Image: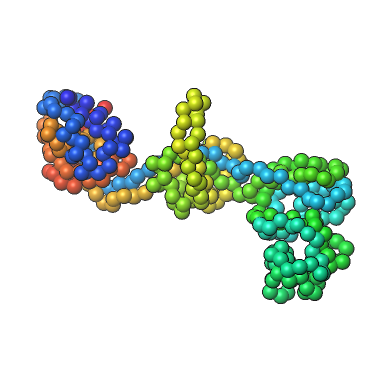
């Protein structure tokens, strides 16, 4: 087997993940070739052995967007006199719409409103959720709890006065809508002048994020909390962090071939930097340093020897010397050299 072919075999094994360490490399070598090395061409291509950090990298394709849409309505009936505009961000205290020229207001919470809030109702988590919102908005003075009492009613009255509602210290079901997090208006399903009765707005998450479907073997570099770089369509980059890794799913491609994919969500550190790129393809790049300040050469410089072991062809002046070496870690098409007559600055022959 020629030197070029032996290098090609090694590179193929690296790509397949079969040579993950120096020890693994020696184990494979005895099965790769059994021929003496061929003569080296005078016009050999070389690379420089260098002291460097070895970094693993993975780059996957993703999409930048606000996530799936969800519909929002209210149990109140009447005529819509105004509706939040597409692109608006909805936070606690913001007006979602006006019905008969009275506001429907967003508040924070995972528990939907399911009854009127008024004196005489039983204790409940919904009461505490309402009081927490009124406290955050500056209207409730005590410690939020599950009891609807006079302090709750007084806080409602203060809130009603501020938003322009009759000050009756009662909130009918549908006057406030609890959202689990800030939301963004994607579309108006009913315009001003229309009647309520169903969904009025289509919402998404308020903040841009990237999503990607990755192979299970790529998850080592895409764990929750891993910092990544997101490549934008204009060639610029913005930083992000892996926010959530979903359970693996089996998907079929256009030809019907099935494969396992893992959905990954990436939060942007500076979402405004990508505001103009919603619903566009992006790249997600993750990296990790696996070895610092080590002697390394390109993987394609390796030659697997008959009977096991690896050598490099070191080019000095017009001479080429075959040098046995010991291997350490592999990363990003580079391999650590842990033993052998090789020094930083030496020129090594590489395959095409």
Image quarter hosting the C terminus: top left
Q: Which is nearer the eye, 179 or 65? A: 179
Q: Residue drawn at (31%, 43%), measured in percent from left and top? A: 331
Q: Residue drawn at (84%, 67%), measured in percent from left and top? A: 169
Query: Is residue 313 among what the camera can see?
Result: no
Image quarter hosting the N terminus: top left
Q: Residue drawn at (45%, 47%), measured in percent from left and top? A: 228
Q: Is residue 212 left or right of residue 93?
A: left
Query: Is residue 171 among what the camera can see?
Result: yes
Count the marks: 0
Q: How is the image coloured?
A: rainbow
Q: Is residue 202 left or right of residue 37?
A: right
Q: Residue drawn at (83%, 46%), measured in percent from left and top? A: 196
Q: Position of residue 189 (x, y in %)?
A: 76, 41
Which quarter of the picture shows residue 168? Answer: bottom right
Q: Is residue 309 left or right of residue 142?
A: left
Q: Position of residue 290 (x, y in %)?
A: 31, 49
Q: Which is nearer the eye, 44 or 292? A: 292
Q: Which is nearer the eye, 93 or 118? A: 118
Q: Position of residue 16 (x, y in %)?
A: 31, 34
Q: Position of residue 35 (x, y in %)?
A: 13, 26
């Amino acid at each position: 087997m020629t030197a070029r072919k032996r290098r090609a075999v090694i590179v193929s094994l690296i790509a397949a993940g079969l040579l993950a360490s120096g020890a693994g490399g020696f184990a494979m070598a005895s099965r790769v070739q059994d021929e003496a090395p061929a003569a080296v061409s005078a016009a050999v291509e070389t690379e420089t052995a260098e002291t460097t950090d070895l970094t693993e990298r993975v780059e996957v394709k993703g999409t930048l967007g606000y996530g799936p849409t969800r519909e929002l309505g209210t149990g109140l009936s009447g005529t819509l006199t105004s509706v939040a505009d597409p692109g608006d961000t909805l936070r606690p205290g913001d007006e979602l719409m006006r019905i008969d020229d009275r506001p429907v207001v967003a508040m924070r919470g995972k528990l939907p409103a399911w009854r009127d809030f008024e004196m005489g109702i039983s204790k409940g988590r919904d009461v505490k959720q309402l009081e927490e919102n009124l406290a955050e908005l500056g209207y409730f003075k005590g410690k939020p709890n599950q009891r609807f009492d006079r302090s709750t009613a007084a806080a409602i009255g203060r809130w009603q006065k501020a938003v322009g509602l009759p000050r009756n210290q009662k909130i009918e079901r549908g006057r406030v809508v609890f959202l689990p997090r800030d939301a963004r208006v994607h579309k108006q399903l009913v315009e001003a002048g229309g009647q309520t009765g169903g969904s009025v707005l289509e919402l998404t998450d308020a903040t841009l994020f990237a999503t990607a479907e990755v192979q299970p073997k790529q998850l080592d570099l895409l764990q929750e909390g891993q910092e990544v770089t997101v490549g934008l369509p204009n060639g610029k980059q913005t930083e992000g962090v892996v926010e959530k890794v979903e359970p693996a799913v089996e998907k079929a491609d256009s030809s019907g071939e099935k494969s396992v994919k893992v959905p990954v969500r990436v939060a942007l550190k500076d979402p405004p930097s990508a505001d103009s790129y919603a619903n566009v393809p992006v790249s997600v790049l993750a990296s990790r340093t696996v070895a610092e300040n080590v002697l390394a050469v390109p993987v394609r410089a390796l030659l697997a020897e008959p009977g096991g072991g690896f050598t490099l062809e070191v080019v000095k002046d017009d001479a080429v010397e075959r040098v046995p070496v010991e291997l350490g870690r592999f990363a990003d098409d580079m391999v650590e050299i842990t033993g052998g007559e090789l020094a930083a600055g030496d020129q090594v022959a590489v395959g095409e």
